[in-house]
Every structure is written in C-alpha cells, then in structure tokens.
Image: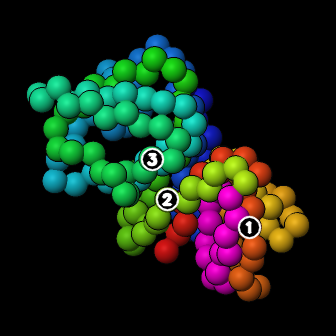
Amino acid sequence: MDSKPYRAFGYLVMVNRFFAGEDLNLPPVKDNRFSVGDSFPYVWMYIDGTVVSTNTATGEQKVRVAGDCTVTDPWPRGEWLVSNATDYDVLCISADTNPGKTPPLPSVAPFVMRAGESRTIGKGTRLLLAEGQIDIDGVIAAGVRPIEFASGDKNVTSITDSYGLVFL
C-alpha cells in the first residue's frame, strides 16, 4: 500500500493505493475485513481500479469502481471482506485523522466528469480534484489538488475521466 496525505479546505485527506493481493491493515480495515455499524466515520471515494467486497453474513457483494463514493452509496451494516484482485486507489477522509474537527467529517459530494464532458462550475465551489485532468477556462488542473472557484463561474471540460469531492 502507498498512502499520501493532502490538505483540502481544512481537512486532512489521504489518497491510498492498494496493490493486488496484499493484505489490508489500515483502519478501519484489519486482515482484509471491516465492520459497518450505526455509524461509519469515513468518506471513501474510489478514484481508480476495481475492488470487490463481500458481506460475511449475507454473501452480498459490492463492486466498487472509480466514481463510487460512500456518501451516495453507503456500505450496508455488517462485516465486509475485501478481495483486492487488482490495484485500486481510494480517497479517504476519516474522523480519526481529523481529531477535534467540527464536524469530524466535512459535508461533501462526489465529483465525476467523464472525458470530453463539459459543465459550468459556480463561484464559491470548493473542489478537491483527486484523479484526472480538467480544463478550467483554458487552465489545466491535474492530479490531487484543491481548487476554489472564487472569482466567478467557470467553464470546465474534463480531458480525462476525473474524480474528486466537492466540499459543500
């Protein structure tokens, strides 16, 4: 596993690269397993690759691919076994790595733009670009970086499939 920290709009976020076949032992995952109860103090945004997880009690499988986010598709309750047959990358925000923050997790929404897609992004939008390349009114932004649209609405075109989080 390779893990890199970044700061975005007052929060510490991690971009974690998990390698095919390795044992996962990074909170909340231990020995390739994690549990979901009444709360799940993590935001996970999948930004590259594919991972399959299986509910150990029900056999239900969740396939996560780039663009999936636990904000809009939360994990059902139960214990999950992670099977990482391929490399994959996850953007993670956790209450554990942001102690004392109020709120402990920011309000966010997934950002997904497919290659060639265009849209207007409004003034005041705070975007953490985590994967891909976008053209913002003729300026290219790439890689992991926070972008604040402070000076007005901007025309944005995605050069590659691009993923991240909008801080609300």
Mark 3, Cα crowd under 10 Å, few <14 / some 14-19 / many 20+, is: many
Which amino acid is tagged 1?
Answer: Val
Label 3 – label 2 distance at C-alpha: 8 Å
User: In the drawing, does residue 78 fall left or right of residue 20?
Assistant: left
Residue 30, compared with residue 98, is above or below; it is above
Instruction: Please tell me whether the stretch drawn in magenta is mainly helix, strand or loop.
Output: strand
Q: Which residue is mark 3?
A: 68
Residue 21, compared with residue 4, is above or below; it is above
**Residue 20 in magenta?**
no
Q: Nearer the viewer, mark 2 or mark 1?
A: 1
Residue at the spot 67% in from the left edge and 70% down from the top edge: 119
Q: Earlier in the sequence, mark 3 or mark 2?
A: 3
Q: On the image, which quarter does residue 137 sit in?
A: bottom right
Which amino acid is tagged 2?
Answer: Pro
The part of the chain drawn in magenta is: 117-129
Is residue 164 shown to the viewer in this render? no
Q: Secondary structure at mark 3?
A: loop
Residue at the spot 55% in from the left edge and 66% down from the top edge: 166
Residue at the spot 17% in from the left edge and 44% down from the top edge: 77
Label 3 – label 1 distance at C-alpha: 21 Å
Residue 133 image offset from top left, x and y in percent: 75, 51
Mark 1, Cα crowd under 10 Å, few <14 / some 14-19 / many 20+, is: many
Determine which of the numbered discs, if any, sits on residue 102 in the image.
none
Q: Secondary structure at mark 2?
A: strand
Determine which of the numbered discs, if any, sits on residue 110 in the image.
2
Residue at the spot 71% in from the left edge and 82% down from the top edge: 153
Q: Earlier in the sequence, mark 3 or mark 1?
A: 3
Q: Which residue is mark 1?
A: 156
Residue 21, compared with residue 50, is above or below; it is above
